[in-house]
Structure formats: C-alpha cells, structure tokens
C-alpha cells in the first residue's frame, strides 16, 4: 500500500520544490497508517496549489483505501487445496463483492474452521441450497450426476471421495477441499452456514 500512496502523492505534488520535499520525507514514515496520514497532508496542500491534480490523487486514494478493505492477501498454510493452491502461495480474496453476487458451484471460499474459529480455511463450493450431494464409486455426485473435477490432486483421483448423502438446505453450502485425502471439509464438519463464508478467492 505504501508504494501506491507514494505514487498518488507524486501525482499530486511532484514537480514543485515543496512537493519534492514532501516526497523525500515520505520515505521516513513507518507503517501504512503513518504513510496514509502523510499522504493526506500532502494532498491537503496540493488542493490549494493544484486543484486538478488533487482531484485525481484524491480519487486514487479513495480507490486504494476501499480496495484495502475489500480484499485481503491469503497465505496458504496447508495442502488441503493442492494442486490448485500450492502450500505457502499467496492469493487475493474478495471480502465484499461476493456478498452482492453470491457464491456459485466451483467457487473457492474463505470460512472459519469450525474446530478453530479464530482461523480460516479455503475450500471449494460443491453444493448450494437444493443440491443433493452423494458419493458413489469414489465420485462426487450432485443431483445424481457425477462431477467433472479436473482440479483434484492425483491422490484424490486415485483414492476417490467418500461422503454421506445430504441435501443442502437453504442458507447452507457444502464444501470440499481439492486434496480429498487430507482436507477437512463438509465430510467432517457437515454443512456450512452461508453466513459463515467470509470471502471468495479471486481467480
């Protein structure tokens, strides 16, 4: 975020002697909060000196701040979603947009771990309200039709998936990990409340 704020500040104050001083002292700020306050101060001065540049920079600041609350970077700590999400990889998670559009089959969503609600996990949505989910011959069936799951790990394809049949009620989702032998998901926890979903992976 500091890099974005610096670029915004440069748009607003760059090219003027006092502006160069403001930019030089930006590097002495520590943390995003202090950098944001310093940028706001520079924009306030720019508003009086260069109103057009100020308007552009202010719009950019609003976008940066909104984005920081709308998205988060997800660090993958386990292999529950391999090979789709590699262990230690980083991914962008939408924290707001999914509430407007809803989630769909195949979406990878963030949710608190039922056994450890202070921590979150990423899992794939397999069933939505009204879906009947069951497993047969190692395959996951939705509404009696076997799912095509090319994202599964090699081990998952060899071992297959076992699950208890269930019909997803209103206000719930059925989620599975892509690495079925190791993932903790709806096979262990049961159905997940849709209200517990906290984000959706941005693919």
Image (tube, rainbow, N blue to C red):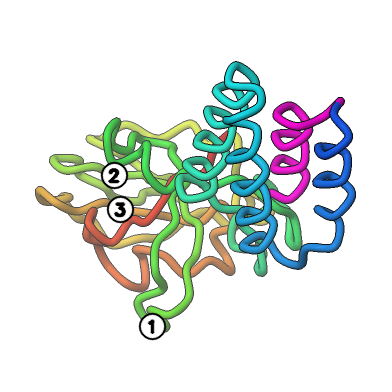
Q: Tell me how far mark 3 sits from mark 2, CA to CA.
A: 5 Å
Q: Are marks 3 and 2 in contact (CB under 8 Å)?
A: yes
Which SS class for mark 2? Answer: strand
140 displayed left or right of 45: left
Q: Quadrant of the C terminus?
A: top right
Q: Residue at x 47, y 55 (%)?
A: 123
- Residue, x 24% and y 42% (percent of image)? 128
| Vertical relation: 111 (above or below) 16 | below
Q: CA distance from mark 3 to mark 1?
A: 17 Å
Question: Which residue does the numbered mark 2 point to in the structure image?
Answer: 127
Examine the rendering and report whether any part of residue 117 can be seen: yes
Q: For the residues marked 2 and 1, what is the alpha-carbon distance in whole angstroms?
A: 21 Å
- Find disc 1 in the rendering and name its residue: 115
The span shown in magenta is 1-15
* Residue 5 is a magenta residue: yes
Query: Looking at the rendered structure, which numbered label has been put on residue 174?
Result: 3
């Amino acid at each position: 975020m500091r890099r974005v704020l610096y670029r915004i500040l440069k748009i607003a104050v760059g090219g003027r002697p006092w502006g160069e001083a403001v930019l030089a002292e930006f590097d002495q700020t520590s943390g995003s909060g202090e950098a944001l306050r310093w940028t706001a101060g520079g924009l306030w001065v720019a508003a009086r000196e260069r109103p057009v540049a100020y308007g552009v920079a202010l719009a950019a600041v609003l976008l940066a701040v909104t984005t920081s609350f709308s998205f988060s970077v997800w660090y993958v700590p386990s292999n529950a979603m391999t090979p789709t999400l590699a262990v230690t990889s980083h991914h962008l998670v939408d924290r707001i947009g999914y509430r407007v559009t809803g989630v769909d089959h195949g979406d990878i969503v963030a949710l608190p771990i039922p056994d450890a609600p202070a921590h979150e996990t990423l899992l794939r949505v397999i069933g939505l309200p009204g879906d009947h989910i069951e497993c047969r011959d190692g395959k996951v069936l939705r509404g009696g039709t076997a799912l095509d799951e090319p994202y599964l790990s090699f081990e998952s394809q060899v071992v297959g998936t076992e699950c208890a049949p269930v019909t997803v009620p209103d206000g719930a989702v059925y989620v599975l990990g892509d690495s079925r032998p190791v993932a903790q998901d709806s096979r262990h926890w049961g159905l997940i409340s849709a209200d517990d979903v906290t984000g959706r992976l941005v693919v």
